[in-house]
Image (cartoon, rainbow, N blue to C red):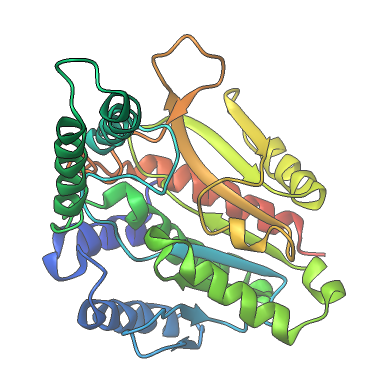
């Protein structure tokens, strides 16, 4: 593994240290983020554009996504604090347990509130439900200022890969596109928008020749590498990437439900999500957790892990030179 890149260190400080970039949700901050990224990538030969006015769903696109053989994606928006739904992924955050409390509250409302076991009346169930609804509302009221792993790590990985390609594999530059997707946290909307644009412009045969590599949450305290894909074509490519790693605990999962920006492409383009997780403390095989995302505990950024992932991606790009 190579030494920590200055790109990773510099952008880690910029995105995690500069408060104006911490919460990438308002139109003004998104535009500032675009200008900063555009300046960086323009010096490396990538033409950039924002495909919106930042008030709606606005992806940041560098390169030509229609002609590129590989499209790298990473969502640049950030989540509200605490509440994890609709992520539906095993996590170890206060929000995950809060979701459980909400489910319990709904069950109590439906079962006990309607049946009424002496001490339990319908109004008690309704009060519990109202309390859980209040919890949910409050969860969405406050910004999460700690988004180091989700998805600052993916943003920095895209910049590192683009920098490495411009220096080490310049002949591949025109064959790649880098897309910072918007509103992943509110329903994969940026990924869906990109998929609609590509499917409208290209034939199914052209789409099948592409690859989407989505990078999400690779900089936390998690040490198990995972590749998630949706198709046999994606599975074959994932296996090639896996072969370039010396890690023993590195698994590939074929799934149609992984909640990240590779999912919108499952019927159009072979797509893979890169992510780091760790085993949950439950007696169930392969149960994993994406620890501390969507919470104030997402304040740790493992530069060495981001470097290892980007080294792996660049090595894979090197195998595609022909």
Q: Nearer the viewer, residue 278 or 162?
A: 278
Percent x, y for residue 188? 48, 62
Q: Position of residue 187 (x, y in %)?
A: 45, 61
Residue 25 location (% of width, % of height)? 26, 70
Please give the count of numbered marks on the rendered protein: 0
Q: Is residue 127 left or right of residue 44?
A: left
* Quadrant of res 186: bottom left
Closest to the observer, 55 or 38: 55
Residue 10: % across, % down:
27, 61
Q: Is residue 306 visible?
A: yes
Residue closest to the eye, 318 or 134: 134
The quarter of the image holding the C terminus is: bottom right
Q: With respect to residue 201, does 148 lie above or below?
A: above
Residue depicted at 33% across the width and 59% down the height: 6
Q: Decide if residue 67 is in sight here.
A: no
In the image, what residue occupies the spot 47% across and 9% down?
283
Q: Quadrant of residue 64?
A: bottom right
What residue is at 19 percent from the left and 62 percent from the top? 22
Please determine whether, in this image, residue 48 is positioned above or below residue 189.
below
């Amino acid at each position: 593994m190579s030494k920590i890149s200055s790109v990773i260190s510099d952008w880690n400080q910029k995105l995690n240290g500069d408060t104006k970039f911490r919460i990438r949700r308002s139109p003004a901050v998104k535009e500032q983020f675009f200008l900063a990224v555009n300046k960086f990538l323009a010096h490396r030969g990538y033409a950039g554009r924002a495909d919106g006015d930042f008030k709606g769903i606005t992806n940041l696109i560098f390169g030509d996504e229609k002609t590129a053989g590989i499209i790298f994606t990473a969502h640049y928006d950030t989540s509200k604090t605490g509440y994890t739904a609709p992520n539906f992924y095993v996590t170890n955050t206060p929000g995950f347990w809060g979701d459980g409390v909400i489910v319990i509250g709904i069950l109590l409302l439906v079962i006990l509130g309607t049946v009424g076991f002496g001490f339990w009346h319908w109004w008690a169930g309704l009060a519990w439900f109202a309390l859980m609804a209040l919890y949910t509302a409050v969860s969405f009221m406050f910004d999460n200022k700690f988004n180091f792993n989700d998805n600052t790590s993916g943003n920095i990985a895209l910049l590192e890969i683009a920098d490495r390609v411009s220096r080490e594999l310049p002949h591949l530059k025109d064959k790649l596109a880098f897309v910072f997707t918007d509103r992943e946290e509110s329903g994969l909307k940026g990924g869906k928008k990109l998929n609609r644009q590509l499917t409208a412009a290209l034939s199914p045969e052209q789409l099948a020749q592409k690859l989407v590599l989505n990078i999400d949450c690779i900089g936390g305290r998690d040490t198990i590498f995972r590749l998630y894909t949706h198709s046999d074509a994606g599975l074959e490519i994932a296996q090639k990437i896996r072969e370039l790693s010396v890690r023993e605990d590195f698994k590939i999962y074929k799934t149609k439900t992984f909640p990240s920006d590779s999912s919108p492409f499952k019927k159009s383009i072979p797509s893979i999500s890169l992510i780091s997780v760790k085993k949950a403390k439950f007696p169930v095989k392969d149960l994993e957790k994406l620890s501390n995302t969507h919470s104030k505990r997402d304040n740790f950024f493992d530069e060495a892990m981001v470097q290892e992932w980007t080294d792996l991606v660049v090595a894979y790009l090197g195998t595609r030179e022909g």
